[in-house]
Image (cartoon, rainbow, N blue to C red):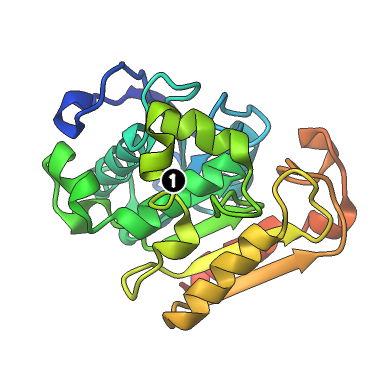
Amino acid sequence: MLYEEIPLSIDYARAGLTGKGEPRLYAYRRSPSPEMAAVPRPAVVICPGGGYQMTSDREAEPIALRFLAEGFQCFVLRYSVAGRVLFPGPQLELAAAVALVRRHAEEWMVNPDKIVVCGFSAGGHLAGSLGMFWNRELLTAPLGLRPEDIRPNGMILAYPVITSGEFAHRDSFKRLLGDRYEENLELASLEKQVSADTPPAFVWHTWDDNVVPVENALLLAGALRRHGIPLEMHILPSGPHGLALAAEETGIAVPSCAAWPDWAARWLREL
């Protein structure tokens, strides 16, 4: 395995943002070998959760190593949190990360047409945001990139924060939006931003999640359905929020949920 830490440089001022983030992309890539074919592989850009207050270790490297074992090239984005850079700062960081992976696709043995974003909880909101906003000037203009540079080919969303309405995880939106809370609240409600250009999605959630209600996934599913966007969704009977791998390795073992990486890997191969 090849491991690399890559700092990302973002001109936040071009987006009218104050503050300064220090986003970093951590790459976990399969080592080239003359014994194995150097075929381009799907890439997974992972956004850990943490309510836009922190980025969870449990939803970072363990997820990357799990998908690496499935044959994918993996990248973990440690994005700006706790109000250091408000919306759309973290979204710009993820867009820049996807563009970087696509730009180095040949060097890093990545299939540039199979780069997916994978997010957990608030990280799911971040990943979903790129799926909704990849072709809007909100992201392309500040980065000086084309929409096709930052477009994710799919989204893997685990117990994601989606809606800013009745079933919102309110603290996530307060930290993301800060003093522009009222101004950007509807824009940040992702079920209202789905369009015909939204990429396919794989979503899983638990029915009794008491932190981010399952209605977040259901509202997204309804919006995707209305726009004809392919979706595979798993609503599992029970399990607390923040399951990560749902195994002892990441602190909470729920066997009925632990197969989700297998399902997501199969979905990605078939994408």
In depth, the one of 143 and 104 nearer the eye is 143
Does any portion of residue 49 appear in the rendered image?
Answer: no
In-image side of 181 versus 105 (left or right)? right
Task: Look at the picture and state if 239 lies above or below 173.
Answer: below
In-image side of 32 versus 56 (left or right)? left
Q: Give x and y (percent) for residue 7.
A: 32, 22
Q: Residue at x 44, y 77 (%)?
A: 229
Does any portion of residue 52 appear in the rendered image?
Answer: yes
In depth, the one of 91 and 106 nearer the eye is 91
Please name the residue that numbered disc 1 is placed on. 185
Q: Residue at x 42, y 25 (%)?
A: 80
How many numbered markers are drawn? 1
Q: Give x and y (percent) for residue 61.
A: 59, 32
In depth, the one of 59 and 227 nearer the eye is 227
Residue closest to the far front: 182
Task: Look at the picture and state if 145 lies above or below 57.
Answer: below
Disc 1 packing (10 Å; few <14; some 14–19; many ≥20): some
The image quadrant that residue 249 belongs to is top right
In-image side of 172 versus 154 (left or right)? right
In-image side of 116 versus 243 (left or right)? left
Q: Give x and y (percent) for residue 148.
A: 20, 59
The image quadrant that residue 257 belongs to is bottom right
Q: Residue at x 40, y 27 (%)?
A: 179
In depth, the one of 34 and 31 nearer the eye is 31
Q: Give x and y (percent) for residue 149.
A: 21, 52
Task: Look at the picture and state if 102 lies above or below 29.
Answer: below
Q: Amino acid at mark 1?
A: Leu
Q: Secondary structure at mark 1?
A: loop
